[in-house]
């Protein structure tokens, strides 16, 4: 009985080891497609309140975590789950980063987001 149990464990260990060896031979495809609305130049943060959803502040940052643009929106509800809104935010982000790279000044409330969302 002991020989049978030990033979079972040895066989199970060899099968497990060979499975690990063959599993590593497969090419690993860990590349995840990033959505088109994600910019490689920076990111944005939307600050809003549940009680006043039509008032929000959007902060745009570059990859060095430096504020490049800030806009306060009043009377406009931002539905950040829609692709169109996300693409407009990406466009404004890239415009503001290009402007910031030239002047190194933080701009505020130039209505870039409000104009982009009304299109």
Image (spheres, rainbow, N blue to C red):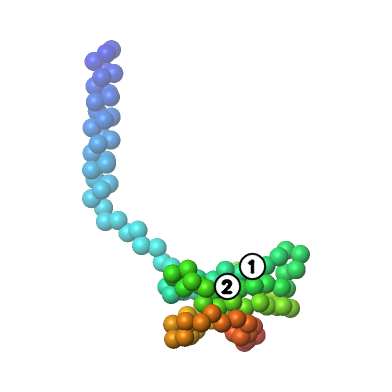
Image quarter for residue 44? bottom right
Residue at image point 26% right, 56% down: 27
As drawn, the label of residue 1 is: none
Q: Viewed as shown, does residue 95 lie left or right of 112? A: left
Q: Quadrant of the N terminus?
A: top left
Residue at image point 43% right, 75% down: 41
Residue at image point 63% right, 85% down: 111
At which x and y percent is residue 70?
59, 77
In the rendered view, tell whether residue 28 sits above or below residue 66. Answer: above
At which x and y percent is residue 29?
32, 59
Q: Secondary structure at mark 2?
A: strand
Mark 1 / mark 2, whichever is N-terminal: 1
Image quarter for residue 92? bottom right
Q: State the residue position of label 2.
A: 59
**Residue at the top extreme, as displayed:** 1
Residue 108 visible in the snapshot: yes
At which x and y percent is residue 89?
55, 77
As drawn, the label of residue 47 is: 1
In the rendered view, tell whether residue 22 sits above or below residue 71. Answer: above
- Are discs 1 and 2 less than 8 Å apart at CB? yes
């Amino acid at each position: 009985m002991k020989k049978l149990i030990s033979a079972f464990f040895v066989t199970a260990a060899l099968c497990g080891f060979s499975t690990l060896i063959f599993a590593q031979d497969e090419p690993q495809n860990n590349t995840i497609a990033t959505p088109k609305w994600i910019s490689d130049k920076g990111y944005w943060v939307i600050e809003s309140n549940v009680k006043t959803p039509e008032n929000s502040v959007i902060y745009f940052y570059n990859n060095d975590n430096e504020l490049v643009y800030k806009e306060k929106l009043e009377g406009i509800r931002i539905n950040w789950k829609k692709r169109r809104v996300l693409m407009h935010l990406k466009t404004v982000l890239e415009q503001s980063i290009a402007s910031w790279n030239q002047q190194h000044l933080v701009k505020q409330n130039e209505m870039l987001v409000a104009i982009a969302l009304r299109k």
